[in-house]
Image (tube, rainbow, N blue to C red):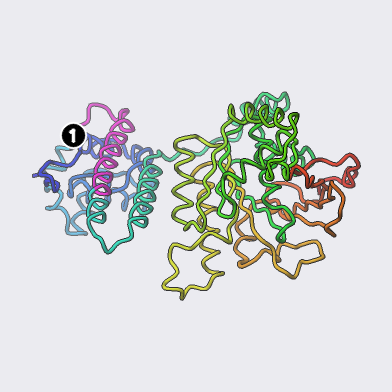
Amino acid sequence: MASLDINGRIPPHNEDAERAILGAVLLDSKVLFEISSILTKDDFYRLGHQSLYQAMLTLNENDSSKTIDIISLTDQLKKDNLLEQCGGMAYIYSLTDSVPSTSNALYYAKIIKTQSMRRNLLNVANMLKDDSFDESKDIKDVVDDGENLLSMLASKGNVAKDYKDARDLLVPVINAIEKRTNGESRNGLASGFPKLDSYLSGGFKEQEYVVIGARPSIGKTAFALTVAINMVVRTSYKVGFLSLEMPAQSLVERALASVSRTSYSHIRTGILKNEELNQLINACDILSSKDFYIQDTPNMEATDVRTQARKMKREKDIDILFIDYIGLIQSSNTNNGLVPRHEQIASISRMLKQLTRELNIPIVVLSQVGRQSDGALPKLSDLRESGAIEQDADVVILLHRKSDSEDLIQDTEVLIAKNRNGATGKLHLGFNKEIVRFEEMLNDMSANQQPK
């Protein structure tokens, strides 16, 4: 008899489909190869069916060339003392009577998987309900655990893909390359700086974890914001920006200065000419039609960062996320201060790396570099607080200026120090102090340098 859930109802399941799939394997052992990438024994509702399926998997593991039939299956169940739990010989013989056609095995497997996911979802919901009543648990941890469990449940629902013959992939790959060549498809999110994009093979890629590092006052935020504004204005990408250091209003003021090319100091002081006001109004019109989303909570915990990123992706379908900066993200588990900061940063970095895969977008994270790089071009090893950032990152971009000159446009070296899927090298950009924006220089010192 089926067991009841806590609400007195029978959990979702389909016993006919379970019987049919087990009977199909007994009629044709090759069925197991089709369904084993979809179903685990825990996907079966009835305990006896779980044991029967596991016995089939065990037989296949011991000798994949051996036919799985009623005789070999019952022999395995006897060895495991599970024959009676599975209903005995008569029940096993009856399974093949439940199979209209073995060709429908994949369809039955998907029915069983769907019902299994429904039961798992109910279990998660019940657990979250219990945790919500437990006032000893931090509610943010409860929410984060719930999001993680739901994300894992969703990923388990994806049917594993079969292997592919490279010969079958040649035509679609060539078609994709042609579309890329003709500009018909996106090859990464362009930064707005062609030289930088050439190093990145077209721009920032999905699932890439990108780190931008520099000493204080070199312009990490300005560089990230310039790239973000380029993406928003020039190509209408949907951009998310988590700012742990600067309030959203200041970021928007900088964005307006960048788009309107109006002096940032004039915006801050309110001393504006009529022409500048008109430029700002035009910039407002441009930005108001774009998708740019800012979260400016200071000292966010890692769980909050993950929650906000998921929220922006789910509700706004953002194409890329910027985070300013990793050193201000608080670990969700410090064990009362006993966990060293470098281990906390390592844990946060791994979380961000995993988040890029989960959301299928590039995540660009700002990081400070150590004091040892003062006056010198920074190195990967100069990234502060944890070597895990260097290890986890797919791309590392380091910024450096030799001196804080009085020039309006300050020459800044941009070093692509790590590029897991492309070239490394160096280029020069100018930092325009007046509008707090990075720009390509007329006399680009890196014009003759090639990616390597």
Q: Is residue 326 left or right of residue 108?
A: right
Please identify the quarter of the rendering in which residue 36 is found.
Answer: top left
- Crowding around mark 1 (Cα neighbors within 10 Å: few <14, some 14 to 19, many 20+) is few
Residue 342 in the image: above or below residue 393:
below
Q: Position of residue 342 (x, y in %)?
A: 56, 69
Q: Which residue is mark 1?
A: 16
Q: Position of residue 162 (x, y in %)?
A: 47, 38
Q: Is residue 240 left or right of residue 22?
A: right
Residue 240 vs residue 344, the one in the foreground: 240
Q: Position of residue 225 (x, y in %)?
A: 66, 44
Residue 339 in the image: above or below residue 89:
below
Q: In the rendered view of the protein, which quadrant contains the N terminus?
A: top left
Q: Position of residue 367 (x, y in %)?
A: 64, 58
Question: Is residue 281 a member of the stretch shown in magenta?
Answer: no
Badge 1 element: helix
Seen at 67% across and 46% down, the residue is 224
Seen at 18% across and 49% down, the residue is 47
The mark tally for this picture is 1
Amino acid identity at mark 1 = Asp
The magenta region covers 97-125
Q: Is residue 449 left or right of residue 96?
A: right
Residue 68 vs residue 287, the one in the foreground: 287
Residue 362 in the image: above or below residue 279:
below
Residue 129 vs residue 401, the one in the foreground: 401
Q: Is residue 261 left or right of residue 11?
A: right
Can you name the residue that lies furthest to the bottom here?
338
Question: Is residue 121 a member of the stretch shown in magenta?
Answer: yes
Q: Main secondary structure of the magenta part?
A: helix
